[in-house]
Image: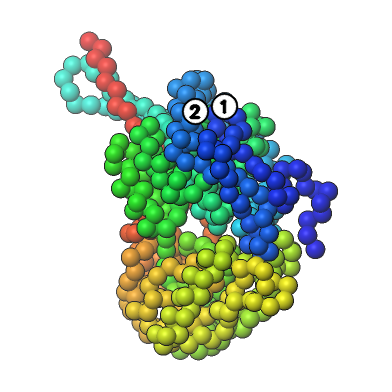
Amino acid sequence: MTIPARHLSLRTPIDGRHRRMLIGGEWRDAVSGRTFETRNPATGAVIGTVPQSDAKDIDLAVAAARRAFEGPWSRFKPYERQLLLLKIADEMERHWEELALSDTTDMGMPITRTLANKNRVLGMLRFYAGMATSIHGQTIGNSLPGEIVSYTRKEPVGVVGAIIPWNAPTAASIWKIGPALATGCTIVLKPSEEAPLTPLLIADLMQEAGIPPGVVNVVTGTGAEAGAPLAAHMDVDKIVFTGSTATGQAILRASAANMKRVSLELGGKSPVIVLADADIERAVPVAAMSVFANSGQICIAGSRLFVERPIYEEFVERVAGFAAKLRIGDGADPETEIGPLISPRQLERVSGFIADGAREGARLVTGGERITEGALAAGNFMTPGIFSGVTDGMRIAREEIFGPIISALPFDTLDEAVKRGNDTPYGLGAGVFTRDVGKAHQLANRLRAGSVWVNTYHAIDPAVPFGGYKMSGYGREGGTEHLEEYLNTKGVWIRTD
């Protein structure tokens, strides 16, 4: 069963038509006239074409964003920005089924999950709307002689370049656009070439909500031809990026030319630590879905499963049994629990990790197989898998797989679990399962990760900051810290005597 067609408007990404990108309030093709296809990863079918932009198009979009920033948008009061964000939230709520189906069709996430993202995404917009009227500086007493008043102002950083991945287009778009609008910045958004349709739909809905021309621009293209020129652009004041660590490093290097501000949310190899006293019935499905959700294509995937030795064999067996029962299929089917990987290239990459794991001596307990027969053969499907017999030095335990594969590792002591859990260049997330509140606090304090979840996973709220340690990046999304990423602080001194 799929969403009935009567609920879908002509905006939906299932008709194969050409979409244009939004620059300066106008829908445009690339200057070069080039286009590229986007495909449904569940079927391989072409679902649309979009412009293949390059540096010339980026120049146009940045110029439009600059004009808007220095023009009418600069005169919008906090209340007006707040009202606009609330209108955008209302517009997206009215079209939520279309947005959910767009994400599902373009990148494969099961429709039950994309529909369930509603509260999170709309909550972000409404949180940022509330914050728009809460931005303020401080009056600060100083110790200089004479009568001098000193205070600070919070001012928008300017033109923001945002580059997002393909694994959650709606949420990723709003996580970048929302704080930009709340603070008075303008933005050029470059979605992934693997899933460009939803950000264009969001731009359309924002226009209906009344966004002024040039405040939000969406430019489609590849990372090399569009993302790199945006990251290096001399008239971009800030870059915010979510994606791989290697690309984040390249963006950081490109930012040096004009010393633009940079926020990076990068890769992860998150540990999930299960103590022997844990509630196993609760821990098994949560630990499993910390990876298998979205077919493992999640930056915070808890792909290193550390289990205390007395329960190791039982826990691995239970996770394997849970994985084997998950329903794999086209994400448009509401019964589907595991959708496809984004592309044949990603499927090949994950298969390479599985081959390396076996070659290095790990044992594939279940799953990890391509589906090459039957109704799903044309898609990029893989059965969720779990390796036992994994050691810390194996490639599957060191590198981010971005696929539905868990590496299970036993441990004996709390200190060992902490040391091995932290033995990674990444530090995005971590999970802990225990009934002992003291051990929960110890682990939460000692694990070097931006988010630690205890007896749960994947909990994200607009009011709570999210981001990484170490090579998982820096900067925060969510909470009051998020808006600070888009603001400059100016000190003002006035002599009054």
SS at badge 1: loop
- The answer to whether residue 435 is visible is no
In the picture, the disc for residue 64 is 2
* Mark with earlier residue (1, 2): 2
Identified at 36% across, 66% down, the residue is 447
Q: Where in the figure is residue 159, as x and y percent of width and height? A: 43, 33
Identified at 48% across, 31% down, the residue is 60
Which part of the image, by quadrant, shows the C terminus? top left
Left or right: 266, with 259 as reference point: right
Front in this rendered view, residue 379 or 329: 379
Left or right: 227, with 7 as reference point: left
Front in this rendered view, residue 105 or 144: 105
Whole-number angstrom distance, CA of label 1 to CA of label 2: 8 Å
Residue type at mark 1 is: Pro
In the picture, the disc for residue 213 is 1
Front in this rendered view, residue 384 or 229: 229
